[in-house]
Each structure stands twice: as structure tokens, then as C-alpha cells.
Amino acid sequence: MSKTILTAENISVNFQVRKRQLTAIRNVSLSLEEGEILAIVGESGSGKSVLTKTFTGMLEQNGRVSEGTITYDGKVLTDYKTDKDWENIRGKEIATIFQDPMTSLNPIRTIGSQIAEVIIKHRGKTPKEAKQLAIELMEKTGIPNAAQRYDEYPFQYSGGMRQRIVIAIALACHPKILICDEPTTALDVTIQAQILDLIKDLQKEYGFTTIFITHDLGVVASIADRVAVMYAGQIIEIGKSEEIFYNPKHPYTWSLLSSLPQLSEKGEELYYVPGTPPSLYKEISGDAFAFRSPYAMEIDFKAEPPMFEVSPTHFAKTWLLDPRAPKVDTPEKIKQLHERMVQLTQEIDADDFEEGVN
């Protein structure tokens, strides 16, 4: 049985914005198992990044954890208040890769010196040892001619190569948890696939646990063990990857999956989720997705649904799972998802074969 490495219990996060209070995270509970890849998905503004920032004490100055407890490896992280408190956790135990590598890299310092600095600070190595370890990390993350490129600057690297360097810096301390915050969004599709493969390969080698934040469910399918779906500051469905893709229960998850481009037929209009998420400045009554859901019942506008158990590993926050609710079939498009994905895989394999022959 896998060990739970981090737990968040009933977490709420508030931001003070121009004398108004915005509740970005609303009573979220989550556990992270050692060695797994957990994907957190949802639209922009759903709270994905804010939630994981609480694990490293990186909330903006106007934000605070107003309720709940986060525990990591026996330590209560919600008790930490200062940067000094976080010194032995942030980067060393829990590292983060951000969407834009240039926010993590110093443009006027060489690539090698930035990796070596982390190794010297957190692992107590000499400058000579740190340089050798930095070059080894550059090689492991796929930088060609690493020794020669050690003294180059960030502007001399492509976007994909810069992201590899950020991964190398994150892994320099051998963290136990790696948070990947949309690390492939700014990259083209080919480079995206390479970075995903790199993260998976490095996880097998180093044995770290991964939290992968994305709004792209297509990315999730190829990398995640479990998936948490977030909406309006809450986790509304969580389960194993195959449970979320092939047996989803929340209408919002249905909408996200229906909008996958892979599910559309040629010439067919792409599906989109109508409406916009509710304002997080106001208290939300009932199910936050009710106003956008074609399946909403009267109770959805009045009472917040509990988390219903679908299986021991699959939970969804929707009144549709209440035994008293009318039976609603999963949309036909979702039922066809498995067959469509198999068909797409076969088409890609056939195209690859033809290219190889030609």
C-alpha cells in the first residue's frame, strides 16, 4: 500500500483585493500518495495554481490560508509564517516548475551557475562538485553538449531548452514532490510531448511524486495516475485517470471532456462550455456549476452537494449521484470516448507506418 506524503484538509484561501475579499479556494481536501502523478485540471481561475502554492508558502502577499491544515511528512505546513520557516521545504523538499521558464531564470547569469548555486546551497557541495553535478543534470534533462553550454545565458536557449533547464534546477535538490504548473502550455506540440516524456522518465529514475497542473485534458491522459477536477475553487471530482476519462460523473467533467478536440469529427463544430464561472467575491450557494449545467435540478441552486463515493478511489460532488435524483445517462459523446481514443491511436500508428515506408 502506498504511503500518503501530503494531506490538505478543509483548505480555504482568501485574497484581499481593493477592500474586497475573494475566496479562491473553498474547503478543499486532498491527499497525495508517494510516487504518483496527480493531475489537477480545470478552467483558468478554478484555483489549481493557488491550491498548490499553499504547499510551498508561495501565495501572494494579499493571500492567506484562512482555514484548514496542510501536513507534509509529519510537518504542519499551515503553521509556517516566514520565508525562514519555509527554507527547508520550498525547493528542497517540494519544488515547482512554472509555465514560463523566464520567470524562474536570471537573464544576466549563466545557465550553469544558476543550477550550481542551488546544489551548493541545498546540498552543501563545493563549487567544483556542483559544476560537475550541474552538467550531469543538464545531460539528464536532454541538453546536448552540456559541458560546452554550461556558460551560456538563457537567451541563447530555445523555449523548450529553457524549460529543461528549469526542470534541472528543480531536481537539483532531489525533491520529494515536484509541482509542474502548466509546464508545456507555452511550447509547441512536439516539444510538449518531449517535456512530458522527460518528466515521466525522470520520475521513474528519481522516484519523486508529481502534481501536474493543466487545463488540457489531452495532456492528462498520457501522464496521470489520478485526476482531480477543479471548478470555482473546489475539487468537484477526483479519481483514477481511467475513471475520470471513461466513467465521469460530474456534469462539469462531462463538459470538459466533450470539449476535447480529439472527440470532434471533421467539419463538426467544436463543443464549448457555455457561460462563465461564478464570481468568487460572493458567497456561492448550491452547486457552483448549476447556472451552466443543462442537468441542474432545483436543489443545485439551494444546497451544496457533498462528495459522493462512486468507488473507493472515485468521488464526485454532484446531486445527480444522490439516490433520490432522477437517473441521467452519461452523454453519448463521453460513452464513445474510449472507442474514439482507440481509433485515433490506430490512425496515428498507421500514419507513422506510412511515413516509415515512404
Image (cartoon, rainbow, N blue to C red):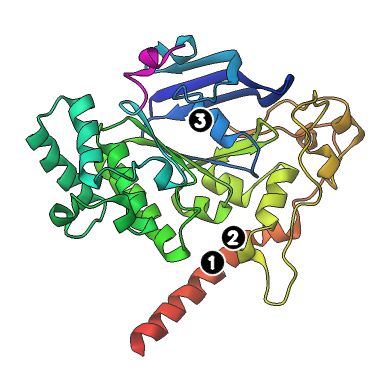
Residue 149 sits in quarter: bottom left
Which residue is disc 3 drawn over?
52
Contact (CB < 8 A) between labels 1 and 2? yes
Residue pictured at 73% horizontal, 72% vertical:
268
Residue 10 visible here: no
Which secondary structure is most common in the magenta stretch? loop
Q: Position of residue 167 (x, y in %)?
A: 33, 44
Q: Position of residue 240 (x, y in %)?
A: 53, 41
Which residue is disc 1 drawn over?
342
Q: Residues within 10 Å of mark 2 (few under 14, many from 20)?
A: some
Q: Amino acid at mark 3?
A: Thr
Q: Amino acid at mark 1?
A: Val
CA separation in Å, label 1 and label 3: 33 Å
Q: Residues within 10 Å of mark 3 (few under 14, many from 20)?
A: many
Specify the quadrant that holds the N terminus: top left
Residues shaded magenta: 81-90
In depth, the one of 152 and 292 nearer the eye is 152
Furthest residue toward bottom: 358
In depth, the one of 4 and 12 nearer the eye is 12
Q: Which mark is residue 252?
A: none
Q: Residues within 10 Å of mark 1 (few under 14, many from 20)?
A: few
Task: Please give left or right for residue 244 compared with residue 286 in the image.
Answer: left
Residue 331 sits in quarter: bottom right
Q: Is residue 156 magenta?
A: no
Q: Which mark is residue 338?
A: 2
Residue pictured at 21% horizontal, 40% vertical:
113
- Chain-order first, disc 1 or disc 3: 3
CA separation in Å, label 1 and label 2: 6 Å
| Vertical position of residue 192 compared to residue 235: above or below | below
SS under mark 2: helix
